[in-house]
Image (cartoon, rainbow, N blue to C red):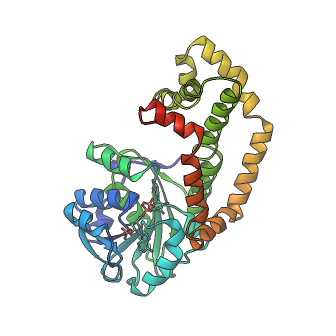
Amino acid sequence: MDLLRDPDIDPAPLTGKRVTVLGYGNQGRAQALNLKDSGIDVVVALRGGSGSRVEAEASGLQTALIEQAVSSADVVIMLAPDEIHAALYRAIEPHLRAGAALGFSHGLSVRFDLVSPRPDLDVFLVAPKGPGTALRSLYEEGKGMIALWAVHQNATGNARGIALAYGRAIGCGRAGLIASTFAEEAEADLFNEQAVVWGAVPELLIAGFETLVEGGVAPEVAYLECVGELHLIAELIEARGIAGMREAISNTAELGALLGGKRIIDDAVRQRMKQVLAEVRAGRFADELSAEESSGYARLRRARAEARRTLLERTRERLAGRG
Ligand SMILES: NC(=O)c1ccc[n+]([C@@H]2O[C@H](COP(=O)([O-])OP(=O)(O)OC[C@H]3O[C@@H](n4cnc5c(N)ncnc54)[C@H](OP(=O)(O)O)[C@@H]3O)[C@@H](O)[C@H]2O)c1
């Protein structure tokens, strides 16, 4: 594995360079503030009437309208939602300086051809492996968040140096920058979102809760067992790994896990995981995401409303003293 940390990385490729952060949301806010605190000349690019302008300026950041901020930039980092990258790139392309660098924090839009950058641009990826809130708080604590980095286009010969200096400036070099590719980062991230942490784990918790309730267990007890213990295992795995977590729990829990885990996650599940990976690689999810944006996020809004009404959520509210 090719993992670099601060002492291995030359900060000079960003010295005297202007970085434009396009978007001031989850990642944009964190990356812009970390860049500023690392001494980088940074400007936040926002659309006219953006509600984020006041907050960014109150944090000491310079802001500008998108066209103006892009035309004065040596490096532009795309930190708006992935599904609008295609339209946003079309809008900014005429304003990008010749030989400028264009950065991303997720490989999706380049991997799935939503964005085809002009050939004169350096195109790089620095993808922190966690949310912007944690990227910022770790930086403020003097720590960093591990990230993947990659180069898609090296038009000027400086793309590698700029990518690494950028990763260092947002604090990721303190934890480690791992060499990857746009395709590997995008495919692994989209796979995990569907098949592991963000897609499958919540559905496993819901299925477990509903199975206990249908079996006559009180919803509060089912909730505490199936949902309430999640943070305990997450913390143990973070601190000790999966093997260490198993050693730390009771023999009862360890034997239960040994006998039960592989009955639930069996070959049929692994086959479906392979199917998800194949579909991701074929671009099926990228198409779904674009369609969702075109529909005004109809499916996402419906699913959010339905999830709020479930017995599981009402049980959570009661346990929190709000129901
Ligand atoms: N969220 C994460 O934890 C995370 C982690 C790693 C990587 N990433 C990647 O980081 C990138 C940004 O994700 P995010 O979650 O930070 O996005 P986000 O919070 O949804 O981004 C919101 C920002 O994008 C701006 N924006 C939205 N639509 C726009 C448009 N049509 N024109 C111009 N600006 C627009 C918003 O402008 P206004 O302020 O005007 O509303 C806002 O400043 C993505 O590529 C994502 O995959 C995210």
Q: Is residue 112 visible?
A: no
Q: Nearer the viewer, residue 149 or 230?
A: 230
Q: Position of residue 173 (x, y in %)?
A: 37, 50
Quadrant hosting ligand 1: bottom left
Residue 283: tell me if it is visible: yes
* Pick the front one: 229 or 236: 229
**Rendering coords of residue 199 (x, y %):** 62, 47
Question: What is the x, y in percent for residue 174?
Answer: 35, 46
Residue at x 34%, y 55% (from the top left corner):
168
State left or right for residue 79 relative to residue 143: right
Query: Residue 165 lies in what quarter of the image?
Result: bottom left
Q: Nearer the viewer, residue 120 or 311?
A: 311
Query: What residue sits 43% from the left and 82% below the top?
Result: 92
Whether residue 46 sits left or right of residue 207 in the image: it is left
In the displayed structure, would residue 298 be above or below residue 4? below
**Residue at the farthest bottom position:** 94
